[in-house]
Image (spheres, rainbow, N blue to C red):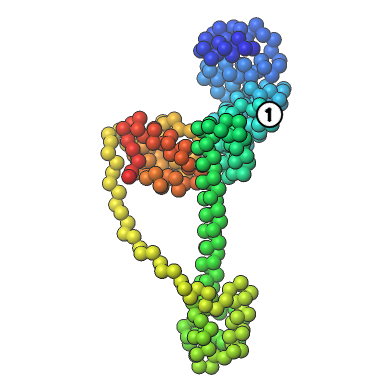
């Protein structure tokens, strides 16, 4: 089959088809070569069918698994693509492109730990591999973003707890009335006042203080713990963005007509961007803040914009 594959690479498709016709159909190598030929002729669905047939015949055929996974990724069948790339990755001499393609898919699906293992595997064998080094940086950035999201969820939970009304808790009538007269209405209010201030209020004694301590302790809180509350940042006035510079037909060009990698395209879709003009309104920081959008995707977007005489907003 090497002759057939060589002819396909040289775009001598008629000769490749004739050569393939002289081979015996039936084994995985035949269907793999046929799939690549069909792909070169633009018959993508038929090509994928042939490549998947090759994988079913021989689940260890690296060429069939790699090209099937590549086309499954193209068609958006991420689960099948990941499964086949993983089979390729089981081989000690797995192609670097297969490993890095798998890394991209795993990162898109939030499987950062596994993605990190594969990119580190590439770098052990090729320490200066440019794409792998960029992917490593992207993955670690994504993992930090995931950590930040967890922290944000924790802060949201804490905020909801601080806003919880005192009336939601079972307190004695005396304690409830004292807190009401002191204008202490939420858990957050209790965390911003000291025990001394509570005890200084008329009719508020040690019994009420112990009651409130026990109530807060159930939530791992204590009186006065937010006394040193950090000042809130000043509210910024929204800034009106100037339209990007460029020809109207270029700015309105749909992103669907631009050849982006799968990761970059998904990130731009998450941001709701539809045209080159929409992208040119974004800054580097805004793009990098998007989930799974790393330095590799940023470089790709900047390069695509430059092809049309555009750039990101400064």
Residue 66 visible in image: yes
Q: Position of residue 64 (x, y in %)?
A: 64, 23
Q: Quadrant of residue 274?
A: top left
Q: Position of residue 310 (x, y in %)?
A: 32, 35
Q: Is residue 51 left or right of residue 39?
A: right
Q: Is residue 213 left or right of residue 279?
A: right
Q: Quadrant of residue 257?
A: top left
Q: Position of residue 189 (x, y in %)?
A: 49, 77
Residue drawn at x 46%, y 38% as measured from the top left:
297
Disc 1 designates what residue? 92
- Give the quarter of the figure containing the C terminus: top left
Which SS class for mark 1? loop
Q: Position of residue 98 (x, y in %)?
A: 60, 29
Q: Is residue 188 left or right of residue 65?
A: left
176 above or below 147?
below
Residue drawn at x 50%, y 73% as measured from the top left:
226
User: Quick one: label 1, few (<14), some, or many (20+) residues within 10 Å?
Assistant: few
Residue 80 visible in image: no
- Give the quarter of the figure containing the N terminus: top right
């Amino acid at each position: 089959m090497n002759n057939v594959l060589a002819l396909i690479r040289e775009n001598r498709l008629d000769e490749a088809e004739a050569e393939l016709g002289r081979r015996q159909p039936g084994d995985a190598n035949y269907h793999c070569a046929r799939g690549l030929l069909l792909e070169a002729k633009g018959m993508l669905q038929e090509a994928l069918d042939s490549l998947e047939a090759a994988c079913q015949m021989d689940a260890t055929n690296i060429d069939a698994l790699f090209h099937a996974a590549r086309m499954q990724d193209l068609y958006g069948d991420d689960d099948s693509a990941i499964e086949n790339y993983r089979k390729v990755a089981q081989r000690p001499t797995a192609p670097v492109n297969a490993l890095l393609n798998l890394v991209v898919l795993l990162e898109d699906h939030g499987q950062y730990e596994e993605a990190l293992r594969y990119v580190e595997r590439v770098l052990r064998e090729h320490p200066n591999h440019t794409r792998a080094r960029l992917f490593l940086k992207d993955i670690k950035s994504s993992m930090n973003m995931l950590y930040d999201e967890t922290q944000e969820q924790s802060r949201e939970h804490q905020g909801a707890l601080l806003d919880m009304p005192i009336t939601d808790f079972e307190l004695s009538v005396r304690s409830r009335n004292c807190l009401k007269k002191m204008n202490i209405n939420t858990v957050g209010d209790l965390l911003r006042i000291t025990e001394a201030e509570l005890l200084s209020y008329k009719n508020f004694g040690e019994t009420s203080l112990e009651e409130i301590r026990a109530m807060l302790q159930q939530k791992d809180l204590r009186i006065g713990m937010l006394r040193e509350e950090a000042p809130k940042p000043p509210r910024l006035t929204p800034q009106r963005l100037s339209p990007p510079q460029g020809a109207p037909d270029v700015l309105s060009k749909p992103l669907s007509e631009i050849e982006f990698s799968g990761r970059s395209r998904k990130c731009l879709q998450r941001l709701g961007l539809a045209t080159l003009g929409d992208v040119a309104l974004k800054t580097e920081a805004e793009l990098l803040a998007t989930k799974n959008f790393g330095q590799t995707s940023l470089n790709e977007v900047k390069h695509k914009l430059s092809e049309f005489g555009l750039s990101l907003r400064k």
